[in-house]
Image (cartoon, rainbow, N blue to C red):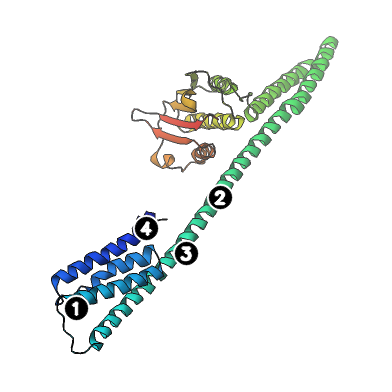
Amino acid sequence: MLGPLDRWPRSTRVLSSLAIVAIVGAVDYLTGHELLFSPFYLLAVALAAWTVGRGFAVVIALLSVAAWLAGDVATGAKYPDPVVPAWNAGIILAFYVVVIVLIVRLRELNRTLEGRVRTRTVALTEEMAERERLEREVLDVGERERRRIGRDLHDSLGQMLTGTALAGQVLQEKLSARGVPEARDATRIVELVGEAIELTRSFSRGLDPVEIEGGGLGQGLRELAAKTSRLSPTRCEYHEVSPVVVGDSVTATHLYRIAQEAITNALRHGRAGVVGILLDGSRGRVRLTVHDDGVGIAVEGVRGQGMGLRIMAHRALIMGGTFEVRSEPGGGTTLVCEVPNT
């Protein structure tokens, strides 16, 4: 990451270092040789070493020593021997050079660290993107396998049970024609097979819901609400603010599963009497809201203690959306999932 000084043009950094030498030299001259101002030249030396480089910093150090020595001489400083000012200038210059070496080394370490941080950040970003891609693929594979099993139940087992029911019905008619008492048992077998067919269809529909791609998501949620009202004492209602067309079938499937899990939680844990499903597709986003009038949800549940809540939140994250579930002050729970409609 670049600091504020690094964003300056190189010419500005060079001129700034020279200006500091000139200003400190002027103040040094005006205050006389009795006051020591050589440490203040370190501002220019440090600036040059950090922002320009080692060579220019040495030049600034030489100029600083020359400005300090010239100022002292110009203000009347007397030396008993020419070796004294030369020794003092050499000591100060050596001190400046040590500071330059330390600052340049620190700058190199800082740049190395910044490079490592950038490299690690890029690698971490790519790793997170790959992980999200794999997680989404795992969920997609799971959904495809679930739908395949649902279709197999409907097409294979459902047809076999239908054939069995027809054969049983034929047997029942033959037994009835002969007037044997076993005809009643055959009738009961046909009824049981019919119940098994309905149960298989129910399982199949749960694993492979109605075609929810495109505008079918609303129809799928409507049928889910009707099924919930039919099979439980809870009244489930579906409302659509505007016709919603979901362009991505994976997104539509995840939204359907989130609504399905939310209804299950409302029935199993919330003891709700009424559950409302609201779908809104305005502003280029799909917003799914599920509200119930049950007992609400505990705070630890909101924080993700329940597996169902974690799965729903994860589905929303995979879709690049937001997920929120809260307990209402007047009772009940509201779940909101909003995802982009691509």
Secondary structure of the residue carrying tag 3 is helix
Q: Amino acid at mark 1?
A: Val
Where residue 63 appears, as percent x and y from the top left, is 30, 72
C-alpha span from label 3 to label 1: 44 Å
Whether 282 is drawn above or below 300: the answer is: above
Query: For the residue carrying disc 3, how many other residues have a C-alpha within 10 Å: few (<14), some (14-19), or many (20+)?
Result: few
Find disc 3 in the rendering and name its residue.
Answer: 112
Residue farthest front in this picture: 74
Q: Of the residues under marks 2 and 1, which one precedes in the sequence? A: 1
Q: Of the residues under marks 2 and 3, which one precedes in the sequence? A: 3
Q: Nearer the viewer, mark 3 or mark 1?
A: 1
Residue 69 in which image quadrant: bottom left
Between residues 176 and 109, which one lies in front from this camera angle? 109
Find disc 1 in the rendering and name its residue.
Answer: 73
Q: Amino acid at mark 3?
A: Thr
Find disc 2 in the rendering and name its residue.
Answer: 126
Find disc 4 in the rendering and name its residue.
Answer: 11
Residue shown at 38% from the left, 33% from the top = 327
Between residues 171 and 281, which one lies in front from this camera angle? 281
Q: Nearer the viewer, mark 2 or mark 4?
A: 4
C-alpha span from label 2 to label 3: 21 Å
C-alpha span from label 2 to label 4: 38 Å
Where residue 265 appears, as percent x and y from the top left, is 49, 32
Residue shown at 49% from the left, 56% from the top = 118
